[in-house]
Amino acid sequence: MANHSKDGKMVRYLNPLNFASYKLDLFELRVVMAAIASVKPDEEIRPSETYYVSAEDVMMLGTRKQEVYAALSKASQTLFHSSATISMSALDAFPSLRSGFRTQYEAYKKHPDKKNYVQFHFLAALSYGDGKIGFNFTEQFIPFIQQLKERFTEFELVDLKGLKSVYAVRIYTMALQYQNHPKRTFITTVEELRKALNLGSAYRLFGNFKQRILDVAVRQINASPYTKFGLELEIEKGEHNRVTRLIFHLQPKPYSVLPSGKPAKYEEGAAQVKAQTVLTEAQATLSMRQIPMYADWLAGRNAKKVEATGFNAHAFFEWLKAQNMNPKGSSSEEFAGWLRAELASPSFVQKIYNPWLKQLGFRSRRRSGS
């Protein structure tokens, strides 16, 4: 799970929403994500409760000021009718979601071999005025975002700012579900992904689908200074050269090395992200107790920590090599020894903080400026 930033708005929802099929444009999706981010983690949501998204919330994600009010007004007319389609098999591991689909889920369980998709709406009511949209969520949608305890996707709303394609947002949020898995891979089929993206008959030829959807999404996710990782796409083929699976490998992308020379439109957001994800020298100074503990964790020598966090010590070792940090060790014990020496240096801790130390739950005891 992502670490909470002090001021960052967090988006949280149960994993099945990632693969629900729905069609929203980029602005509408930004508004929906901002609405979800307005829900507090332990809050009990009622259909009568209204949650607001302001022009400032959407401008934070990249919408220009001269466009935002007209776009909000338009979205207020279209979002109320927006809906998603979900397979009942996706609810097997999520009892909390079944209450809103009781009849349909029971029908599916009687005939599990048959496809059973159900359409539901996000919103029970919508209002617009004074430059903000008010949302009332439906009883079917509320369990996706209410009092989440496990198997949910979580990210900072600002993660989406550098993504200019709705498909880049969707694929990024799908991949987020796998960021703490040991192999850090998101695997799907062309058919599954097309259905989730609600493409209908568009881009039927795989070459067009790859060029217009996959390549654009991967390029934007990798180029954005706000996303938590990059993606490398592997295309698996079977008989007759037919594409069988799409494998997205999540690649480390530490924010401590932010892209330089970004266009002016990135500067404010990049500064915000950097402030949230880079340690000061004081914060990066580990105690004598922390150094051997984190060295063992980073070297994969604590099985319980590896299982709990999904940390991949081999991927970390390879990343260090790619960063020309020359890691040493033919065994985990030797690697941990090398790490103990390196972790004594605050500059090394700063370099590996995101995503590696963050994944292990590192939190500095020293405040910035102390």
Image: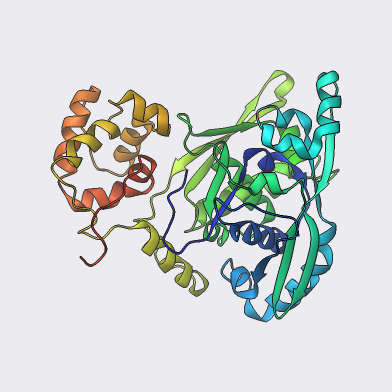
Q: Is residue 216 visible?
A: no
Residue in front for this viewpoint, 216 or 165: 165
Residue located at (86% from left, 32% from top): 103
Q: How many labels does the image show?
A: 0
As drawn, 86 above or below 89 = below
As drawn, 71 above or below 111 = below
Quadrant, the C terminus: bottom left
Where residue 321 appears, as percent x and y from the top left, is 30, 38
> Where is residue 331, by image quadrant?
top left
Q: Can residue 302 be seen in this view?
A: yes
Q: Is residue 66 left or right of residue 5?
A: right
Residue in front for this viewpoint, 4 or 275: 4
Q: Is residue 304 left or right of residue 124?
A: left
Residue located at (79% from left, 65% from top): 126
> Where is residue 332, by image quadrant?
top left
Residue located at (84% from left, 38% from top): 118
As drawn, 114 above or below 130 = above
Where residue 41 appears, as percent x and y from the top left, is 54, 52
Residue in front for this viewpoint, 50 or 161: 50
Where residue 212 appears, as percent x and y from the top left, is 70, 49
Residue located at (41% from left, 27% from top): 307
Where residue 187 appears, as percent x and y from the top left, is 61, 31
Q: In this view, does 310 lie to the left or right of 172?
A: left
Coloration mode:
rainbow
